[in-house]
Amino acid sequence: MIQFERFILGNGLRVLVHEDRTTPLVAMNILYDVGSKDENPDKTGFAHLFEHLMFGGSVHIPKYDEPLENAGGQNNAFTTEDITSYYLTVPAQNIETGFWLESDRMLGLAFSDESLNVQRNVVIEEFRQRYLNQPYGDTWLLLRPHVFKVHPYRWDTIGMDISHIEKATMDDVKQFYAGYYHPGNAIMVIAGNTSAGHVKELAEKWFASIPPGKQVHRNLPAEPAQESIRTLSVTRDVPYDMIIKAYKICSRTHGDFYALDLITEILSAGNSSRFYNNLVKKKKLFSEIDAFLTGELDGGMFVISGKLVDGADIPAAEAGIREEITGMVSETALPEEMEKVKNKAEAAKIFREINVLNKAINLAYYELMGDAGMINREVEKYLALTADDIMKTGATYLKDENCCVLYYRTGKNHK
Amino acid sequence: MKTATDRTTPPRLNDIGGFPAIHPVLFKLDNGIPVYRVSGGTQDVVKIEFIFKAGRLYQPSPLVASFTNNMLAEGSRNHSAFEIASILELNATMFDNETGFDNSYLHLFTLNKHLEKTLPVLEEIIKYPVFPEMEFRVLRQNRKQDFIVNSSKVVSIGKRKFRNLMFGADHPYGRELQVADFERLDIAGLPDFHRKRYSPEQCAVILSGKVTKETVDLLNRCFGAKWTDDVQRSDIPEKKAANDPVRKHFLEKKDAVQSAIFIGRPLFNRTHPDWHALVITNTILGGYFGSRLMQNIREKMGYTYGIYSSLVSMERGGYFFILSEVGSGQTAKAVDAIYGEMKKITCEPVSPDELNTVKNYLTGQFLRGMDGPFAQAEKFKILLESGLDDSYFTKYLETLSNISPGIIMDMAGKYLNPEDMYELIAGKNGV
């Protein structure tokens, strides 16, 4: 159980406080309700590039990192399709340094040309390192536009292409900042060795004077329903074939999410899973295979991704997956499978309550989804599901006409 | 009217000293296995870690150590691989194994209430594995494929080659793994390695989290008796590392869009008297985001997504290395800039401001490393593995508070001279 208090400043900034007196630290997370889905299709990768620029100095503070390190703190940030999240931990004695730094970059950035130039290059190197210079590294660059044709989820957070990052201008930076980086579009969570009273004081002192921004009105194009199975085949210089099957599913906040989540667990979690025992060990079709949900807020994906074992061919491997999906949607899961995945959901909730930074990041995300209190109640949704529920929900989504297949073929000849 | 908040002056910093000392409670199982107990935490969660002297250092031929460890959960006297996984997973117990240079590890992480069902399974795994052929073949094939996939990554191939340069092909730390090693690996050697190395005499346990008396009793019931007859310690002779006489090396990967740069040298492990001061020196050079390498090569030049330097401590030696992946066209410039930073730290004193920031950052890091029983158990593991006591941390904090620009320069001059370094570039040639 994670207890918290919530208050809202006059400028619209929502603040949550979770007190944990067993840690010497305080964690601070500021979630901005902006992600790669808010990008212009001609300027993709921008939300993430912008995340880098948030460290390039703010109105009164030339460098973000050094003062925090000087206070014994550490920080990082990440960007997804839906959000941009900045987090830090600092010894509780120096909590105010976090407020000072975060409030100043919510108030205004330095907009330095040098920072933009350098970070453009850094992000291009990140693109190369993570997407181009790795075997199978462009998988998500291929999969997203294959699955989404209209919705901005069709590009990855790194962007469609390096050229988009190269073209980013200071005007783009300023516009993006004005549009999304203001108190009403943010959720701040403070967790750790502090009190709600102290946090209120500090929040008033540092954040209350930041002017409110214009409320964000999203008008994103809805992804039309798919009518038949889609396939895409690419050949790359990789050692083994890979198959990805992606089914479009509901939003992370929809009730069906939980049943789908349990299906991925039954299929692929651990060495007692169906995929491991049937497809890896018994039929020897895959060297590794996984099923997982991507969890986007406007509707995500149920993804099955497997690398073929040397000697297996794609049709046989795909038939193997198909058989498992058919089994999942036409027969109810075994009682011990249901017990297993529910026990895991229960334990996962408790594991999430151990680390103060995890707690802060999770509270912010649940608050964005509608109510941070759900973090304590969501497990009940898993526990209430029956084998019949998950079979029926599976049947709704895991059908061919809702599936996009990516055949990622090796260019090497097998011996 | 409220006065406006002064945003240009940073808030006053407070002293962040006063650390909880790590004093795990040591007790022994009936057969003498030492168990270190780090209690605490807010959740009813427990972690049990077994550490055996069964790392790569001790293996008679390549892959034996890690395959022995990987195979332990693949079938036992009373349970099939599927049954083992099923019982653990039914009871929400995370099981993992890992094999390092010196030691091998197996751990369970679970809710206290499940332990009664799952600890006896760990007993089967550790004491009575049967090494079934079918599971071995599957594992060998899948690990071989994983190895081949990794062999197309500049960092993976570079790491292998770099250790080879520093320690030599005959040393267990330096031998480079080949695809053929997977094909040559014989299952027959695994039970023998298990019998010799997974004995109570070569074992220690770290218990962390909400540890109850029931857990302690259960642990003793499962592991407190003698379980192997092979009690003699089978230590291996000291092998001298053979460094490559050539300092600069290149490993070609034709289609690479980035090169991995490795620069480093063999050094010593954490029992060396200069270790702590060198850790601080390394932090300034490349050990945190504010480090000179990160600030210069990434934040000024924009050549890379990341660059860091590290010190690695093993039972029989250690090494220092810098690693970065940089755009193929910028490799030479990045290498020059790296040597420039190394030279600078050896001949210019660090400014009081920079030193102060590093000291405060490392103090904060130390605090983060002590946050909760699981983090503390990890810190304690360092002591256990190196045969150190907790005066190690006291000395570290003392070194941190007494460190001076002179000591930093002295450390850098002794250990971080560009002329003493090995250099390896893995990537595209001719750029």
Image: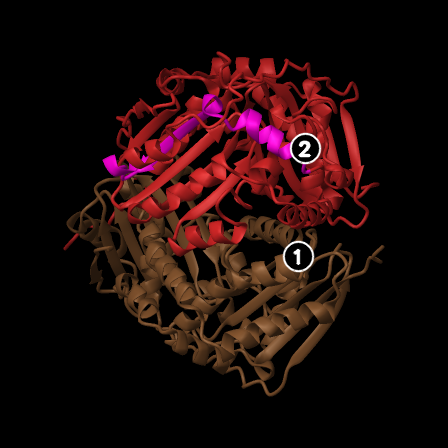
Chain colours: A brown, B red
Q: Chain of mark 2?
A: B
Q: Residue at x 85, y 58 (%)?
A: A413
Screen quadrant of the C terminus of chain B: top right
Disc 1 residue crowd, few under 14, some 14–19, many 20+, Cα 10 Å: some
* Badges 1 and 2, same chain: no
Q: Residue at x 69, y 22 (%)?
A: B171
Residue B358: percent from the left, percent from the top? 43, 28
Q: Residue at x 27, y 42 (%)?
A: A95
Q: Residue at x 64, y 65 (%)?
A: A141
Toward the viewer: A195 or A120? Answer: A195
**Distance of mark 1 from mark 2, alpha carbons?**
22 Å
The answer to if B203 sits in the magenta stretch is yes
The answer to if B343 sits in the magenta stretch is no
Picture quadrant where residue A284 is located: bottom right
Mark linked to residue B262: 2
Q: Amino acid at mark 2?
A: Phe
Q: Chain of mark 1?
A: A
Tell me the SS state at disc 2. Answer: strand
Toward the viewer: B413 or A207? Answer: B413
Residue B85: percent from the left, percent from the top? 48, 51
Mark linked to residue A137: 1
Residue A197 vertical placement versus A368 (above, below): above
Disc 2 residue crowd, few under 14, some 14–19, many 20+, Cα 10 Å: many
The reply to whether residue B334 is visible in this rendering is no
Residue A10: percent from the left, percent from the top? 22, 64
Toward the viewer: B323 or B413? Answer: B323
Tell me the SS state at disc 1. Answer: loop
Q: Amino acid at mark 1?
A: Gly
User: What range of the chain is rendered magenta?
Assistant: B187-215
Picture quadrant where residue B89 is located: bottom left
**Residue found at the far bottom of this picture:** A227
